Amino acid sequence: MINKCVCIHCLKDVTNPRFLIPAHFEALNANYFECSPDIIGLDSTKTDSIMKTKLNYYGISVSADEPQRLTCDASEKTLKLKSGLKIVVKSVEKLQREYPDSISELENAATIDGKALFIYQPFRPMAATELVCENCHLILSSRNVIRTTIGSETVWESIDGTQESNFTVSLIAGSKAGKTNLLLAMRKPENRVHLRLMTEEPFIEQHFTQAEEALSEGNVPETTLSPQPPITFRTEKNQDINIIDTRGEETKEIRIDRAVWSDMLIVLLDIASVYEASESGQTDGLKRLRQYLSDLERHCRTRNETKPIILCFTKCDLYPDTADNIMLYPLKGKANSYDHDKLRVIRNYHFMDNTENLINSMCSELGNKMQKQNAGIYQMIYRIIQDIISCCNQISGRKVDIMCIAPLGTPAKNGKINADLYHPRHVDSLLHRIIQYASEAKS
């Protein structure tokens, strides 16, 4: 299996990876653009206009505190700087012969087709150790890549010894369905047992740290207005799992490129917020999700491909009785004592054969909790969800998992939660299933 070098920000194969020049290299002065057109700069004051547009699209900003970021392409070259120092791009073997005193430094160098970028300066030689995507200028998880051919297609293959393959998962839902809170819950150590959280890009860590600080203060993170930075987990078998959030209103724009490039989809259904609606017009978000999945199903049919799907009912803390019935074990039960594979089969059987009863029970429990009688809303919910299930079945080749999750574990009101009651539910089980799918794809 070829492990493609894929940019999880752009969600596509990297066309031309670039070397990231170490941030602490200060020999390039304010006129570094004059050194060579091969060098592209990214900082708070001199940001390449194309890169800036792409970063804005991904909701990423470069603060004044960030060191300037410089990158260089992989064509063989020697760039002499005004300071008298030089940047050399050659094969690792040539560099080791020319600079025998820097062999240990070159052993950690990032490589593109066997070439490395080496900065020669007295007393402090250094090599580039990271690669970035040419399109969005953000750091790649792969540090060593080579060109390879698959059929008639030329792609970049990762040859990192610590990483065997990538598996990309996209979260699909309308706005305020709990995607951001789910990602935050996935990052918690108690939910990601046997998974190591990988931090490749400083922008990502800054983004989620701020969101986690908001939760600790009882504030629910604001609705995502742009695609969020992905998070990457590494399994015990050195497989990277990239989980990507999408902008909630993406279903409104019907942008399916992220879903198309993903290996797997998690579709989040927040029927609680719909059931709270006082007017039928407030179900528009669920209708847009149905249209999005319908378009995606048509696209997958045209390409003759399928994608596994986990269909998650979110915010199950609002309907705990029905949710526990779906999950088939109580809140305080022994989560490590059940057979995951058997549980999956039972869940699907229970759900697919009792869809109407399940949704009716869920809406009834929500109705009693919220003290509202919206039978008309329930009927609308039932019809839309039936259509969503049908689309998911077609996209996945009838391989849909049904689960309940509670990304917060406690109700939110007016953007506030009780931070002391913050306790996500069933997220560990969801991650376990994702790992199983990733392992199946790898084999």
Image: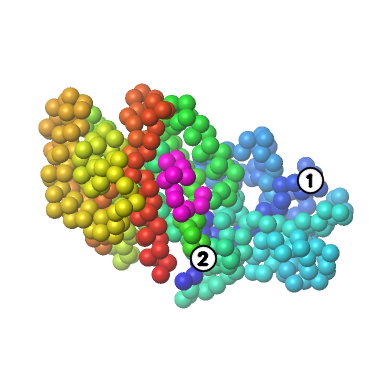
Q: Is residue 26 left or right of residue 246?
A: right
Image vertical order of residue 38 relative to residue 363, above or below: below
Name the residue: 34% across, 51% down. 336
Res 164 label? 2
The x and y percentages for residue 37 are 71, 54
User: Disc 2 on helix, strand or loop?
Assistant: loop
**Mark 2 Cα shell of 10 Å, populated few (<14), some (14-19), many (≥20):** some
**How many residues crowd mark 1 within 10 Å: few (<14), some (14–19), many (20+)?**
few
x 70%, y 61%: residue: 108
Residue bounds of the magenta highlight: 184-197
State the CA–CA distance, disc 2 to disc 1: 35 Å
What is the three-letter code of the residue carrying label 1?
Glu
Scheme by which the image is coloured: rainbow
* Residue at image mark 1: 26
Q: Residue 44's image quarter?
A: top right
Q: Is residue 114 magenta?
A: no
Look at 77% across and 71% down and name the residue there. 94
